[in-house]
Amino acid sequence: GAGVSQSPSNKVTEKGKDVELRCDPISGHTALYWYRQRLGQGLEFLIYFQGNSAPDKSGLPSDRFSAERTGESVSTLTIQRTQQEDSAVYLCASSPRAPSYEQYFGPGTRLTVT
Amino acid sequence: GDSVTQMEGPVTLSEEAFLTINCTYTATGYPSLFWYVQYPGEGLQLLLKATKADDKGSNKGFEATYRKETTSFHLEKGSVQVSDSAVYFCALSAGGTSYGKLTFGQGTILTVHP
């Protein structure tokens, strides 16, 4: 079946602009996670959604970052007033139940802030 | 906080060589440990896991043993193939309320030549 998909695959934006990144999880997966990977570093947890429960936002680095998910479907990560340090690959993952360490990752969105 | 440290790469081997990628961790409590792999053009996927001390995870000829005394989870394979060329990530889940939030190492690029 279809895996996790993310769009766009690449995004170049100017400093100060807002960006939206989209994640389509595997159908039927109740949990959805966002991670960030800066160049040369490991993945950093950002936020996770579990069904209709309140999301765990403990990894969001600042109030410029927010994410939404409607039910068990698509999620959008929004970064407002982008800064150069936001440049990274943003990865989305989903799992059939939550919480779970067995997460299925998408290909990522490479964000470059100029 | 929790952290994972992997040996610096990249690692370049000839086919049929022995592989070791070192991984050590820092965590409170008793984390679960994982190796994830990212093949070229694909998303990260779980390779193997160990959920308690002295457990050995294994898959596709790869093995790793959870060593609590040395806080390590080194990945090994006796005879690598060209198809093993990928980026390997060591990760942990601290459990409890953090279960599902994965903490990753920075990744090790493995290239296997024929």
Image (cartoon, rainbow, N blue to C red):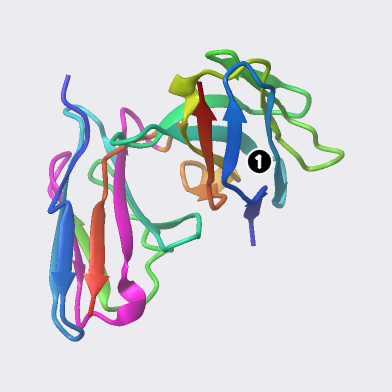
* Residue position for label 1: B31
Q: In the displayed structure, does residue A82 sit left or right of residue B98?
A: left
Question: Is B79 or B114 nearer to us in this picture?
Answer: B114
Picture coordinates of residue A46, whole percent (x, y) = 38, 59
Find the residue positioned furthest to the right: B69
Find the residue positioned furthest to the bottom: A16
Query: In this picture, is A48 found above or below B89?
Result: below
Q: Which image quadrant is residue A38 in?
A: bottom left
Picture coordinates of residue A87, whole percent (x, y) = 31, 70
Q: Specify whether residue A101 is in view.
A: no
* Chain letter of the residue carrying label 1: B
Picture coordinates of residue B114, whole percent (x, y) = 50, 21
- Residue at screen point 58% across, 37% down: B12
Query: In this picture, is B94 found above or below A90?
Result: above
Question: What amino acid is labelled 1 in the image?
Answer: Pro
- Whether the magenta-drawn stretch holds residue B4 is answered as no
Q: In the displayed structure, does residue A60 sit left or right of residue A67?
A: right
- Total marks in image: 1
Q: Quadrant of the N terminus of chain B?
A: bottom right
Q: Specify whether residue B33 is in view.
A: yes
Q: Few, some or many C-alpha atoms within 10 Å of disc 1 (few <14, some 14-19, many ≥20)?
A: many
Q: In the displayed structure, does residue A19 sit left or right of residue B31?
A: left
- Whether the magenta-drawn stretch holds residue A94 is answered as yes
- Residue at screen point 66% across, 21% down: B17
- Residue at screen point 32% across, 36% down: B43
Label 1: element kind? loop
Region rendered in magenta: A70-98
